[in-house]
Image (cartoon, rainbow, N blue to C red):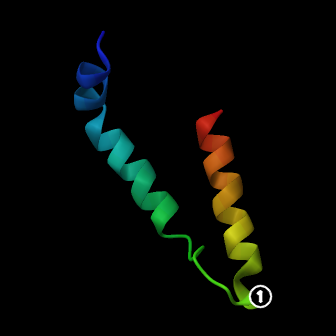
Amino acid sequence: MSYETYFSTHRDEHLEELKQWLKIPSISALSAHKDDVLAAAHWLTDTLK
């Protein structure tokens, strides 16, 4: 299966995963959001495994 076919077939799944990741307020220079940045990093590493 080509990557184009794979991504076309799984488009909705990938979009939902991206939406989950983007909901985490992880872009911040404020130390108050340190845990959010770490949560986003952990979410990404877990998803890519």
**Which residue lies most toward the top here?**
1
Q: Residue at x 51, y 59 (%)?
A: 21
Residue 28 at x, y = what percent? 62, 82
**Residue 8: image location, x then y, percent:** 22, 30
Whether residue 28 sits left or right of residue 35 in the image: it is: left
Image quadrant where residue 29 sits? bottom right
Q: Look at label 1 and name its amino acid.
A: Ser
Residue at 29%, 14% in the rendered image:
2
| Badge 1 density bin: few <14, some 14–19, many ≥20, Cα 10 Å | few
Task: Tell me how many marks there are.
Answer: 1
Q: Position of residue 6 (x, y in %)?
A: 30, 22
Question: Disc 1 designates what residue?
Answer: 31
Q: Is residue 9 above or below residue 39?
A: above
Task: Tell which residue pokes out farthest to the front in this image.
Answer: 29
Quarter the N terminus occupies:
top left
Query: As drawn, is 20 to the left or to the right of 49?
Result: left
Q: Is residue 24 above or below residue 32?
A: above
Please name the residue shown 42% across and 54% down the image. 18
SS at mark 1 in the image = helix
The quadrant in which residue 9 appears is: top left
Residue found at x 74% / y 66%: 38
Q: Quadrant of the C terminus?
A: top right
